[in-house]
Amino acid sequence: MSEDQQLTGAERVAAAARRLGLEHEVVRHGPAASLAEAAAARGIEPRQLVKTMVVRVSAGDHRFLLVPGDRQISWPRLRALLAVNRLTMASADEAFEVTGYRRGTITPLGSRTALPVIADTRVRGRISVGAGEPGAGLSVDADDLVAAVGAQVADVTEPAGDGA
């Protein structure tokens, strides 16, 4: 078993952040029933809580997508960016298999599989991303994270609907 496989999710994420030279802080807050509740517990605005989603382009071809908490994927924009006709969200099981993280804890840091990252243009300033385990977030500078993971920055979201 590798050293990273013996770590908790948050320890694995923090170790990956350190390897990339990212200044970061793990913020633990316990269970949260919604994105708004998690943002409040982390002391940030919902837009600063950045969701890391796993999008399936085709079998065996996935992307991480960094989406501000107050936004949702614009599927037409994302399909145009990737020059494909069809995209889907990875299932919960598929996302876990690819990343080693459960939904709500996913982050591009320390993933089982290195995936290309797309960050929405609105991912800016101090943000919080998943920390690999429930009830925790990783606070980091957006520009530093985007640079460290080599993310492609593009306008791929739209305002979230009432269910966000």
Image: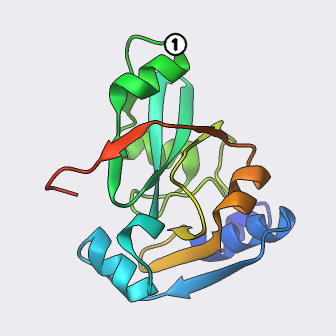
Instruction: Tell me: 129 left or right of 89.
Output: right
Looking at the image, which residue is at 49% across and 72% down? 133
Residue 63: x percent and y percent? Answer: 55, 35
Residue at the farthest left position: 162
Colour approach in the figure: rainbow
Residue 148: x percent and y percent? Answer: 78, 54
Residue 116 higher or lower than 22, as above or below: above
Res. 49 in view: no
Residue 8: x percent and y percent? Answer: 61, 75
Residue 154: x percent and y percent? Answer: 56, 36
Looking at the image, which residue is at 26% across and 51% down? 160
Residue 161 higher or lower than 49, as above or below: above
Nearest the viewer among 19 and 150 is 150
Nearest the viewer among 104 and 60 is 104
Instruction: Tell me: 116 left or right of 20.
Output: left
Res. 147 in view: yes
Total labels drawn: 1
The quarter of the displayed image where residue 145 is located: bottom right
Q: Residues within 10 Å of mark 1 (few under 14, many from 20)?
A: few
Instruction: Tell me: 19 left or right of 153.
Output: right
User: Split into 4 quadrants, where in the image is the N terminus?
Assistant: bottom right
**Secondary structure at numbered mark 1:** loop
User: Split into 4 quadrants, where in the image is the C terminus?
Assistant: bottom left
- The residue under label 1 is which amino acid type? Ala
Residue 157 higher or lower than 137, as above or below: above
Nearest the viewer among 30 and 65 is 65
Q: Mark 1 sits on what residue? A: 83
Looking at the image, which residue is at 45% across and 84% down? 42
Looking at the image, which residue is at 41% across and 26% down? 77
